[in-house]
Image (cartoon, helix red, strand yellow):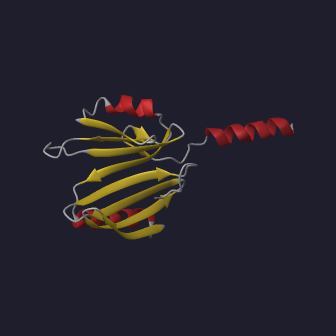
Amino acid sequence: MRTALGALLAGLLLALPAQAWEVGEFKHGMSRAEVEQALKTWNFSKTLSVGNDGLLVYDPPNHPAGRRFLFTFCNGSLVAFDQEVEPAFRHFVIIASNYSNLYGNPLKVIPYTSVIASGEKNLLAMFWRKGADYMGVKYVLYPSSEQLSMTWQISNNCWEAPR
């Protein structure tokens, strides 16, 4: 009886929906091949492998869509997705405000300044948590440009989330 009850409880726990992010057709745990297959319908101009664990897909700067996605894998599974949006501080404030309204105060705030070849790089990143998921917004100022991205991450054994 105890074994049957234990098996039933284990089965119920496995049947519960996993807390995991899903953005469009991209969701945590997908293999690189599954991500590449899903990307075929997006018709990105460029695809670039980034190290052993990353895949960057983007359109050239003069393309009207201006899309740019970064997929990060750990042990063959998708653990992070970054989507760039039009860089404007106003957009950063709107995204951060929306996340704060949905999830409360940020779990982690990362202010960071460093020196790169072309000058100074300044970053402000904010992360919120819902279950096992981390949602965030990153705003980076470079000497002659800026970058704004939204990120979805999940804890993994390759690096500490959020980052």
Depicted 74 relative to depicted 121: above or below: above
Left or right, 158 with respect to 97, comes to right
Q: Residue at x 22, y 35 (%)?
A: 45
Q: Residue at x 55, y 49 (%)?
A: 156
Judge by depth and name the residue closer to the eye, 46 or 23: 46
Q: Residue at x 22, y 65 (%)?
A: 143
Depicted 106 relative to depicted 43: above or below: below
Q: Position of residue 160 (x, y in %)?
A: 53, 56
Judge by depth and name the residue closer to the eye, 102 or 25: 25
Depicted 45 relative to depicted 131: above or below: above
Q: Total number of numbered labels?
A: 0
- Quarter of the picture containing the N terminus is top right
Q: In the rendered image, is residue 46 in sight?
A: yes
Q: Position of residue 150 (x, y in %)?
A: 34, 55
Q: Residue furthest front?
A: 117
Q: Position of residue 130 (x, y in %)?
A: 50, 57
Q: Position of residue 24 (x, y in %)?
A: 36, 41
